[in-house]
Image: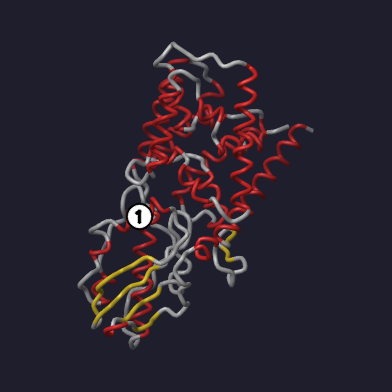
Amino acid sequence: MSRLYQFLGLLTCLLMLTAIALRRDGRFWGREIDADQPSVQEASNEEPAETAMFLAVEGEGAEVINTTVPGREINGYSGPTPLKIYLKDGVVIRIEPLPNQDTPDFFSVTLEKGFREQWYGKTALEALETSVTPVTNATYSSTAFIQNVQAGLTAYLAAKGGQEAPAPAVSKPPWHPTLKFFCGLLVALAAAVLPCFLKNKYCRIVQLVLNVVVLGCWCGAFVSHTLLVKYLAQGVQDWNALLPLLLLAMAFIYPLFGRRSHYCMQACPFGSLQELAGKCSRKKLRISPQWLKRLDAFRQILWAMLLMAMWCGVGFLWMDNEPFSAFLFRTAPPVALALAAGFTLLSLFVPRPYCRFVCPTGSLLKFAEQE
């Protein structure tokens, strides 16, 4: 009976997250749901909504390509990333993003000086043939940006007289198995299997360090609300998802077989960082049982409030500011960096304070494990 309750808890979590994905992105598993309705982020944007027409003419004869239609199947890390491409006399002069649903700190990398300029000053065909490398630590967002440019220019050349051009870009980022991918997968497999059979404090320290260095800092692989909502909205796009899916299996499937909190205790990079920090100090603050109960209640109430905010169509930004993203130094928001630094220092005196008293993702996982 307890396993049935756990299964129902897991199903409830999936339904809650599905509702959030539909509320934010209007998609489920890559399919548009009620596509005529504007997304929350578009509706809240101060600028007027862009038209669906992909080609228009503005002042001084500049032609403008709107990639909303030709690039509608192209997704960044968290959703579609349409662009406006400006051409003058057939030459690309400017590329600007339209309101989008992508994670702001990942997408902002594509707006840094030097990225968009790689297409400037080139004819449409030359720009289309230009090879641009995706940005490290923002692969999905930068790849989507590149593919939107390609899709828009392909449609432009076709509209201008059927000039031959390469096929429109596909929505899936290219999969190139790398040393980073295989190392991350190996560390995750070790976290999934070894703790079930091996109990050794030195091996655990090695695993914790690998979780922080490889899964966190190198691969940027961790379970978060952003990741869960992304997969429910977009679906699994390619083999790059194998590592996150393994972590999700530890988080949601393992508890069904008696391994509760396996992901949090054995694989979470931020949980591992807090535990390692705690080993550096023997002085610990004593927290009374009454305060432990209050802090646990605070964690649950906080999670409920955040979920309620998202169901009401607001407050999605907090997902991108969970301290897990601090491992991606280049794209991490300042709030995430500050939270990660603060709770890491606090963990010198309080064991795993973020995991135990704040973590909304941990609250979600505990809800799925309830009996």
Circle 1 residues within 10 Å: few <14, some 14–19, many ≥20 = some
Of 5 and 362, nearer the camera is 362
Task: Quadrant for residue 217, please give it.
Answer: top left
Question: Is 242 on the left or on the right of 365, as rendered?
Answer: left
Of 143 and 168, nearer the camera is 143
Which quarter of the image is occupied by the C terminus?
top right
Describe the element under mark 1 as helix, strand or loop: helix
Which quarter of the image is occupied by the N terminus?
top right
Residue at the image position 25 percent from the left and 74 percent from the top: 92
Q: Which residue lies furthest to the top in this view?
A: 282
Q: Residue furthest right?
A: 1
Q: Residue furthest bottom?
A: 161
Question: Is 64 on the left or on the right of 315, as rendered?
Answer: left
Query: Please, what is the three-letter code of the amino acid marked with disc 1?
Result: Ser
Question: Is 211 on the left or on the right of 289, as rendered?
Answer: left
Where does the image place residue 357, in percent across and percent down from the top left? Answer: 56, 29
Where does the image place residue 145, in percent across and percent down from the top left? Answer: 36, 62
Q: Residue furthest left?
A: 121
Task: Quadrant for residue 119, please give it.
Answer: bottom left
Where does the image place residue 262, in percent across and percent down from the top left? Answer: 57, 29
Where does the image place residue 202, in percent across and percent down from the top left? Answer: 43, 16
Residue at the image position 39 percent from the left and 31 percent from the top: 341
Task: Quadrant for residue 54, please give it.
Answer: bottom left
Tell me: residue 124, above or below residue 27: below
Query: Which residue is denoted by mark 1 in the rendering?
Result: 108
Tell me: residue 227, above or below residue 301: below
